[in-house]
Amino acid sequence: MAEVTSGERRVAVTWAQSLVRDAGAREILFDLDTARQQVFGREGKSATFDLLAKSHANLLRRWAEP
């Protein structure tokens, strides 16, 4: 990082927090969403896509913390 010799350097500090606390549950949701996107890429909106989307949404509701 270059030394600041004039003017000013601005920094933004941020963080992200998941609604799902458990790392294993987050991994399952990630994998399920990846599969959903792949099915949509191959088939478009189909019965398989709808089932994956429904399952993802149901698990997210079950595991998400208020």
Image (cartoon, helix red, strand yellow):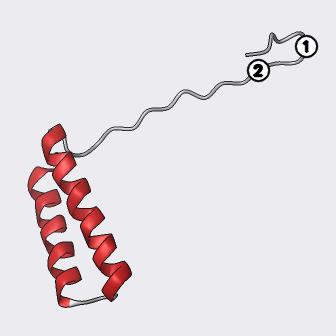
Disc 2/disc 1 C-alpha distance (Å) = 9 Å
The residue at the far left in this view is 62
Q: Is residue 66 visible?
A: no
Query: How many numbered marks does the figure carry?
Result: 2
Q: Residue at x 20, y 47 (%)?
A: 26
Eyeballing the image, is 56 above or below 24?
below
Eyeballing the image, is 62 above or below 58?
above
Screen quadrant of the N terminus? top right
Quadrant in the picture for residue 45: bottom left
Eyeballing the image, is 4 above or below 43?
above
Left-right relation of 20 to 44: left
Q: Residue at x 38, y 79 (%)?
A: 41
- In the image, residue 20 lies at what x, y percent? 20, 45
Quadrant in the picture for residue 46: bottom left
- In the image, residue 18 lies at what x, y percent? 29, 42
Residue at mark 2 = 9
Nearer to the camera, 66 or 44: 44
Nearer to the camera, 25 or 63: 25
**Label 2: few (<14), some or many (≥20) within 10 Å?**
few
Q: Is residue 53 visible?
A: yes
Q: Report the disc number at residue 30.
A: none
The residue at the far front in this view is 42
- In the image, residue 30 lies at what x, y percent? 26, 54
Residue at mark 1 = 6
Secondary element at tag 1: loop
Left-right relation of 61 to 6: left
- In the image, residue 52 lies at what x, y percent? 18, 74
**Label 1: few (<14), some or many (≥20) within 10 Å?**
few
Q: Residue at x 11, y 66 (%)?
A: 58
Nearer to the camera, 34 or 62: 34
Left-right relation of 5 to 42: right
Q: Are marks 2 and 1 in contact (CB under 8 Å)?
A: no
